Amino acid sequence: MGGLLSEELLSTIGRRSEPRREIVTRRDIRKYAVATGNRQRKYLDGDEAPPMFHVPLFWDVVELGQLTPDGVSIDSLLPKFPLEKAMAGGLNIEYHKPVYPGDWLTSTRTLTDIYEKQGRSGSLIFYEVVMDIVNDDGDLIIREKTTRILR
Amino acid sequence: MIVNAERFAGLRVGEQLPGREHTPDNVQLMFYNAALWNGHRIHFDEPYAKNVEGYPGLVIAGPMLGDWLHQCVEEWLGEDGHIFSIDYSNRVATYIGDVLTAGGEIAALNVETMEVEIEVHIKNQSGDVVTPGKVVVRFAHAG
């Protein structure tokens, strides 16, 4: 291993965001369904949320002054990594229950892993963030794991 | 639980899902990023995307391609089941002007659990797989 990961950096594994509670509205479902080119009536009418509706529902809303010059909001869950160029990452999503307008959902994000691998052209850092989404009864609705690669 | 056992029994490994061509334009990309509240300039500020970041054009937001993988499966599945899980990654950047085709193929069938594993992908006009993935569908729904 290249030893890019300090003890301090690794100690951020397990860091958890404040829970965020949001309401699902018919209007937001309809806008998302239109934007993604969905052709199913139940989504275009907002009767049910399509898969991946949690992406717009929980995208961070930050103030203009908090954006970087390229228009991105800084993810406060993440530590400062010694590599910064983001490469392709992957997503794993499990859908446990359907989502309807009027549902209140709460998401909590956890930094679950940081590790290093040797790529063809040097060291790569991988990190994983799990977002758990529950309803007001505490039932798990969606679990999403994002894996990102830095070089 | 309602199960369309007849349809499930007729499925075969290797069966192709209907493909769908997507040709996202500026309006669709703007709507998508507005729905997310995503201010990343590479998706709407063409001079910035080209001159500062060196892209050939406006970059299609990665999760929109992920959404199209879901749509490909759901349009094929109808009301006979639901998507339980997906794994996918955005491997190659795509741009406004690209012709992106979503498709899939049944990779495995589990008769016990009535689960279907589907290899899904988005290809660009050169035939490169830009977004490969795997979806698990459960052929039963509450009702």
Image: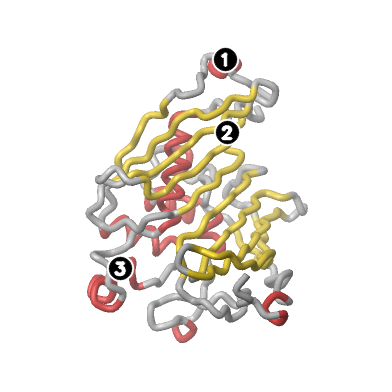
- Secondary structure beneath dot 3 equals loop
* Residue positioned 41% across, 50% down in the render: B65
Q: Determine the chain carrying the residue at label 1.
A: B
* Residue positioned 58% across, 18% down in the render: B4
Question: Which residue is labeled 3 in the image?
Answer: B44
Q: Is residue A95 above or below residue B60?
A: above
Calculate the distance from the C-alpha at mark 3 to the C-alpha at mark 1.
Answer: 47 Å
Q: Please name the amino acid that badge 1 sits on.
A: Ala
Question: Which residue is labeled 1 in the image?
Answer: B9
Q: Please name the amino acid that badge 2 sits on.
A: Val
Q: Choose between B52 and A29: the one closer to the eye.
A: B52
Residue A105 at what x, y percent from top left? 65, 57
Toward the right, the furthest residue is A137
Task: Look at discs 2 and 3 and give the one toward the viewer.
Answer: 2
Q: Determine the chain carrying the residue at label 2.
A: B
Figure disc tally:
3
Earlier residue among tags 2 and 3: 3
Earlier residue among tags 3 and 1: 1
Question: Which residue is labeled 2 in the image?
Answer: B137
Residue A110 at what x, y percent from top left? 68, 66
Q: Is residue B113 above or below residue A150?
A: above
Calculate the distance from the C-alpha at mark 1 to the C-alpha at mark 2.
Answer: 14 Å
